[in-house]
Amino acid sequence: MKVLTVLVPTYNVEKYLRRCLDSLLLPEVLEEIEVLVVNDGSKDGSADIARAYEKKYPQTVVFVDKENGGHGSTINVGIEKAQGTYFKVLDSDDWVNIGDFIEFVKRLKEETADAVICDYRKEHVYNGKSEYFEYKDLEDGKEYNLNEIDLDILHGEYFMMATTTYRTEVLRASGLKMLEKTFYVDMQYNIVPITKVDTFAYYHLDIYRYFIGRKDQSMNMDNFVRNQEHHKRMIKWLIEYYTGIEKELTPNKREYIEIILTYTLNTHYSIYCEYDKDHKRAYNEICEFDAYLKKTNKRLYDRLNCMAYVRYNRETQFKFVKVDGSKWHKVMVLARKVKGRFAR
């Protein structure tokens, strides 16, 4: 058995796929890893490139060709077919830092934790800047118990797809089944397996390179507005999933998952309260969703009152959304600037 399966979801990335695969296929780790390239119905030359790598590295690269089903569908296939003890997702336009990746695989050979957390870097290729993200208060090489750890050590952050490597049997035990033909499903990947994760190790290694090729690519709210139905489908799935299992979880796991859900819900409310320019639609959507959340999970509903704009919009029955949510957004931006000035 390989120590690590790296899933490379692939869709129309002939421009970047070679860079991704070359960063993984290093002589030092070829015998230890499985690179699973799942082609999601690409219409360019991505499949031909992947087949060529499979032919060149038959003991390491496995190519799977499938009809288009979206990012989530490739992960579903990857989890089913993975042969490695651990499982990591590397999007095909991203890559890994070669030096630290070799060290990462070496350490995994002796690892026993349910998950391994590492650092990552956003590469803003359009302006040449690089942003490094790390978990500053976690100790390199230490194993933690998620049920007992003081979550304040994470400073309100959580483990993302780019930073997390799961033990494959934990992924399968969690029953994770990603939504297909739906955006934003990485949030499922961040939440569902955690229900089965008891221990995690932290490696202070700079591994994942997250490619940002355009100035407007990262967390662009116009994209969220345009794809709001996808976001609603995903967040409702998460709410109902969590509501169904929360009583079975330890207090720490409940709190950890609620941290993630609060971030995600904040984004969802922002789409309608601050950014959607179709004010009538935004008003109808957010009123309906707010009532749904209150009925489905009152604990999450109340928790979101920590967001001032959500609390005030609720108190005014979202009338500012109906008039012009962008005006409220301008007020909030000014308020945050003033708060930051006084904080200094």
Image: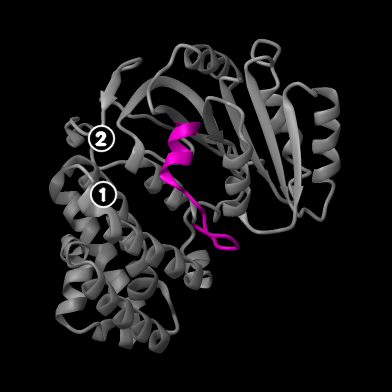
Looking at the image, residue 241 sits to the left or right of residue 298; the answer is: right
Looking at the image, residue 321 sits to the left or right of residue 210; the answer is: left
The residue that appears at 39% across and 63% down in the rendered structure is 235
Badge 2: few (under 14), some or many (20 or more) residues near its Cα, within 10 Å? some
| Position above or below: 2 against 340 | above
Determine the image quadrant of residue 138.
top left
Calculate the distance from the C-alpha at mark 1 to the C-alpha at mark 2.
11 Å
Give the image location of residue 319, x and y in percent: 25, 86
The residue that appears at 83% across and 52% down in the rendered structure is 44
Disc on the earlier residue, 1 or 2: 2
Q: Which mark is residue 30?
A: none
State if disc 2 and disc 1 touch (CB < 8 Å). Answer: yes
Q: Is residue 96 visible?
A: no
Give the image location of residue 239, x and y in percent: 32, 62
The residue that appears at 45% across and 11% down in the rendered structure is 110
Residue tagged by mark 2?
Answer: 154
Mark 1 lies on a secondary structure that is: helix
The type of residue carrying mark 2 is Leu
Q: Is residue 34 magenta?
A: no
Q: Which region shows up in magenta?
A: 164-184
Q: Quadrant of the C terminus?
A: top left
Looking at the image, residue 211 sits to the left or right of residue 203; the answer is: right
| Position above or below: 81 against 312 | above
The type of residue carrying mark 1 is Ile
Mark 2 lies on a secondary structure that is: helix
Q: Which mark is residue 259?
A: 1
